[in-house]
Image: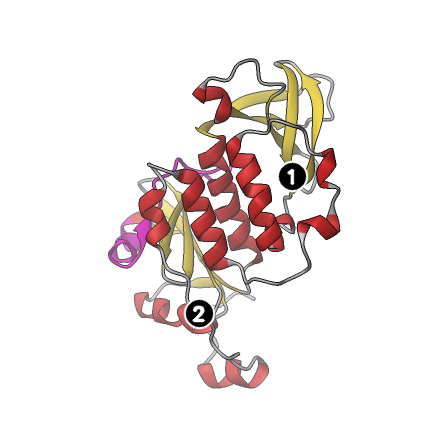
Amino acid sequence: MELDKPLTREVLDAVRPEPEPGPVPGVDWVGLVESDPIRALEAFVLGWFPAGAAGSIGERTNEGEQPDNLPEALRAFYSLARLRPAVLGFHNPVLQQPQRTSGPLGDRLVFAVDAEGIRDWSIAWPPKTKTPSENDPRVWLTEDPSMDDPETSPEDEPLSRFLLQFTLYEAMSIAPYQARTYCMPTPCIAPLRSVLCPVPLSPFLPTYTGERFLVAPGLLAAISGDEKEAVVTFSALHRATLTPLLAHGYRWIRFDG
């Protein structure tokens, strides 16, 4: 639904009653992104996703089929999945069983895929050394992996930071409450920077939307644009978290608050 003026609170309450509010996830994990991205990922996942939903990873996959000697970040992700199985239910999934394949750059281990099959993400496999760079390897994005000569390019972030990017992006897409602005002059988003904390990561999918992530307690945001125009997307666990955004006077393509 396209909205110049969001529906009134009374109408929303009638058609979609406000659920009992739960805990609001904090943002302390942002301070760990540069020094310890794996701990940042753990803190975000444990805070954002509810416990006890949809069974456990052990019920859904054969852990014995995962390769030995996975990099630390992937091992941490699968450990988190045992506690928060929701991270295995993304629209674009992290594979429960990474797949060995080969391409222009040699043998690879594909660990995440686009749901439409138009791209995947991989690391070199098997690792050749035990150096720190091999424990946090470069991630490769492959476009149209089913083609004979697919295009492959490196991601800006190593695996540990990429998995945090990927998880933030997918968490936004499956959050129960969302809002998205129309394209607007970039200076109009300046007031948001006083209430949102930037996540120190490179833009995600720079050749597509190039989204930069920002957060506040219980709220995720992504800004896509340049110095002239931008679109802002928000996701929240509780509807009321979005309501204060109305004060900025934006025009909304979607607003669930």
- Residue 203 falls inside the magenta stretch: yes
Horizontally, residue 25 falls left or right of residue 167, namely left
Q: Position of residue 142 (x, y in %)?
A: 61, 26
Q: Which residues are magenta?
A: 187-210
- Residue ID for mark 2: 23
- Residue 26 falls inside the magenta stretch: no
- Mark toward the start of the polypeptide (1 vs 2): 2
Horizontally, residue 222 falls left or right of residue 227, namely right
- Residue ID for mark 1: 114
Q: CA distance from mark 1 to mark 2?
A: 31 Å
Q: Amino acid at mark 1?
A: Asp
Do we see residue 20 in this rendering? yes
Horizontally, residue 118 falls left or right of residue 239, namely right
Q: Nearer the viewer, residue 180 or 25?
A: 25
Q: Which mark is residue 175?
A: none
Q: Amino acid at mark 2?
A: Pro
